[in-house]
Amino acid sequence: MSEEIERTEREDLFSKAVKAGKRTYFFDVKSTRGNDYYLTITESKKRFGTDGKFTYEKHKIFLYKEDFEKFMEGLNESIEVIKENAPPIVERESYSSEGNSSNSGEVNFEDLGK
């Protein structure tokens, strides 16, 4: 049992949670038995079931240090393409104190599925 506790302490070196809207991203630095470091990136989304209870849907990738440079190159290039080509983000309209939206109550139901 003490070996497992010692192993857990050795494996978990750093953790950072980043909340971003409906998602939370976890960046965890861990070590292997051979004391080599790697990164796990986990995306966690809160999902509501038909019974009203919620669960967390998680997706995880493992990123090893020998792949950091190529991963960062691909990530940076992809982000630049998005910044240069994606349409601008449109802020959602705010609601007044009476509960009516500033667009006189018009609702586009096609937008509700996003």
Image (cartoon, rainbow, N blue to C red):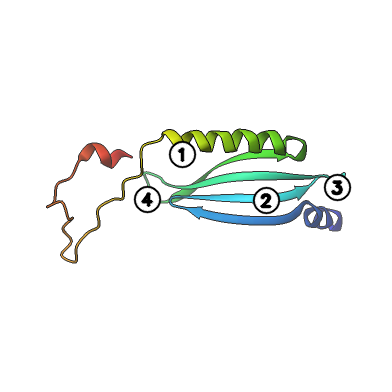
Left or right of 45? Residue 103 is left
Q: Earlier in the sequence, mark 2 or mark 3?
A: 2
Q: Secondary structure at mark 4?
A: loop
Query: Is label 1 in a helix, a strand or a loop?
Result: helix
User: How many residues crowd mark 1 within 10 Å: few (<14), some (14–19), many (20+)?
Assistant: few
Which circle's residue, 1 or 4, is located before the other in the chain?
Answer: 4
Residue 71 in the figure: left or right of residue 82: right
Disc with the residue nearer the chain's start (1 vs 3):
3
Residue at mark 2 to residue at mark 1: CA–CA distance: 27 Å
Q: Which residue is mark 1?
A: 83
Q: Residue at x 76, y 40 (%)?
A: 65
**Which residue has dot 2 on it?**
28
Extreme residue toward the left, this view: 104
Q: Looking at the picture, which amino acid does disc 3 mark?
A: Asn
Q: Identify the secondary structure beneath mark 2.
A: strand
Q: Which mark is residue 52?
A: 4
Between the residue at mark 1 and the residue at mark 4, the CA separation in whole angstroms equals 38 Å
Q: Nearer the viewer, mark 2 or mark 4?
A: 2
Residue 35 is labelled as: 3
Real-space Cα distance between discs 2 and 3? 15 Å
Q: Residues within 10 Å of mark 2 (few under 14, many from 20)?
A: some
- Tag nearer the camera, 1 or 4: 1
SS assignment at label 3: loop
The picture places residue 76, in percent across and down from the top left corner, at 58, 38
Q: Which residue does the image show at 71% across and 56% down from the upper left?
A: 14
Q: Amino acid at mark 1?
A: Lys
Q: Are marks 1 and 4 in contact (CB under 8 Å)?
A: no
Q: Hey, what amino acid is under mark 2?
A: Asp
Residue furthest to the bottom in view is: 97
Give the CA distance from mark 2 to mark 4: 31 Å
Looking at the image, residue 83 sits to the left or right of residue 50; the answer is right
